[in-house]
Image (cartoon, rainbow, N blue to C red):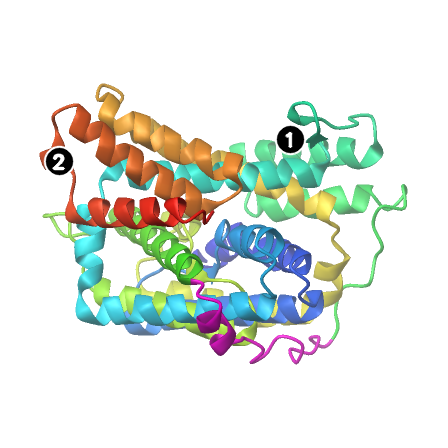
Amino acid sequence: MAGFATFLTMVYIVVVNPNIMAAAGIDQGASFVATCLAAAIGSALMGLLANYPIALAPGMGLNAYFAFAVVGGMHIPWQVALGAVFLSGLIFLAVSVLRIREWLINTIPLSLKLGIAAGIGFFLGIIGLQGMGLVVANPATMVGLGHVAEPKVLLSCLGFLLIAGLVARNVPGGIIIGILVTALLGIPFGLTTFHGVVSLPPSLAPTFLQLDIPGAIGLGVAGIVFTFFIVDLLDNAGTLIGTTHRAGLMRPDGSVPRLGRALLADSGGAIIGSVLGTSTTTSYIESAAGIQAGGRTGLTALTVAVLFLLTLFLAPLATSIPGYATAPALVFVACLMAKSLRDLDWEDLTDYAPAIITALSMPLTFSIASGIGIGFITYAVTKVLAGKAGQVSGAVWLIALLSAVKFGMGAG
C-alpha cells in the first residue's frame, strides 16, 4: 500500500517527462519507455542497496534544464546532452565512493540549498505557464499575458485549479487525475487526439545507447555536467534528509544511515537513465506519501519499481496527453518547490538575499547553472562586505570563483 501511494503521487512523470523530452527532439514513445524503465531500475536499486522507502525517476527541473536550456537554448544535440548526463552520473558515483559528497553537502549553506530548490521551481513555473499559454513573449516587456479566452488556455487553467484542489483534499493521484481530466475535456475542441489505452511498449531503439560521450567531452560541456551534478547532489541530499526524518530513520545526531548506499543507487540510476535515453534520474520527494502510509523499508521502493514496469503497457494513453494538459502539473510542482523559501533565516540579510537572487536568476536567465553561479557569488561577496567572511565555506568559494571565471569568459 505504501508503494502504491508513492506511485500514484509520482506517476505523472510518465506523461510529463516524454512531453519535455519531445521538446528536445527525442522520440516520445521511446522516451516514455525510458522514463518507466529508469524509474523502475532506480527505485529497485534504492530498495535493494539502501533498503529505503524512496522511489526514483527522471527529475523535474533537471529534465527542463536538459530540454529547454541545454538542447533548446545552447543548441546542443540531445545525444551530446545525454552524454553530459552520463558523465555527471559518473562524477556523482565517484564522489559517493570517495566520500566527497559529505563535504559538499555539509559545507554548502542551507540558505543556498533552499534558494536552489525554489529557483528550480520557478524555472519549472515559467515553462509551465508558457505551455499553458498564459504567459507569452512580448517585445516591449519581455513577457506578457496570453490569450486567456482561448479554449486551450482556459482548459490549462482549469487543470491547475483541479490539481490544486485534489491535492489539497489529499486525493491520491491528484496530479495525474488533473492531467487526465484536462486532456479529456480537450477532445470536443479537437485539442486532444486519443490513441487508446493499452498496447505493447513502444520501441526503445530511438534513444537506447544513443548518448554521445565523446561529443560531450569534445564540446567542453563542463559547465553543463557540473550543473547536472550539483543540482542532482543537492536535490538528492534534500530528499534523503526530508524523507528519512519523516520516516524516523534519521540518527539522533542528524546524520542519515546508509547514506553512501543511497547515493550509489541515485548515481547508478542517473547513469542507467542516460543510457536508456532520458535526463537525470533522482530521488523523489513524493516518496513521503508512501512513508506517510507506513512504508519504512526497501519493499516500498521495490513495489514502485514493479508498478512502473506495468505502466509500460499504457503507452497509447500516455502519448495521447497533449502539452497543455501537462503544463499545469509543472506549475503545481513549482508551487510545491517554492515552499523551501519559508525555511530561510529572514532575520539575516546575508542569508536570505543571496537565496532570493539565486531563485530569481534561474527563470529570468532561463538557466539553472547561471542562477547557481550568480547566487554563490552574491553569497560570498555579501558575507565579506558584511564582515562575515568566516561564514563562507571552501565549497562556496570554489563554486563562486569558477562561476565568476565562466561569466568573465562570456559563458552563460
Name the residue carrying label 2: 391
The answer to whether residue 196 is visible is yes
> Callout 2, which amino acid?
Gln
Name the residue carrying label 1: 161
The residue at the point 42 percent across, 34 percent down is 359
Magenta: predominant secondary structure element? loop
Q: Residues under labels 1 and 2: Cα distance?
A: 43 Å
* 205 on left or right of 109: right
Mark 1 Cα shell of 10 Å, populated few (<14), some (14-19), many (≥20) = some
* 104 on left or right of 10: left
Q: Secondary structure at mark 1?
A: helix
Estimate the x, y position of residue 83 in percent, counting from the top left. 49, 71
Estimate the x, y position of residue 228 in percent, counting from the top left. 42, 58
The residue at the point 57 percent across, 48 percent down is 173
Q: Nearer the viewer, residue 129 or 203?
A: 129
Which of marks 2 and 1 precedes in the sequence?
A: 1
Eye-nearest disc, 1 or 2 = 2
- Give residue 221's quadrant in the image: bottom left
Q: Is residue 213 magenta?
A: yes
Q: Is residue 180 magenta?
A: no
Residue range corresponding to the magenta coloring: 200-221
Q: Secondary structure at mark 2?
A: helix
- Give residue 281's quadrant in the image: bottom left
- Are circles 1 and 2 on residues that touch, CB within 8 Å? no
The residue at the point 58 percent across, 71 percent down is 79
> Callout 1, which amino acid?
Leu
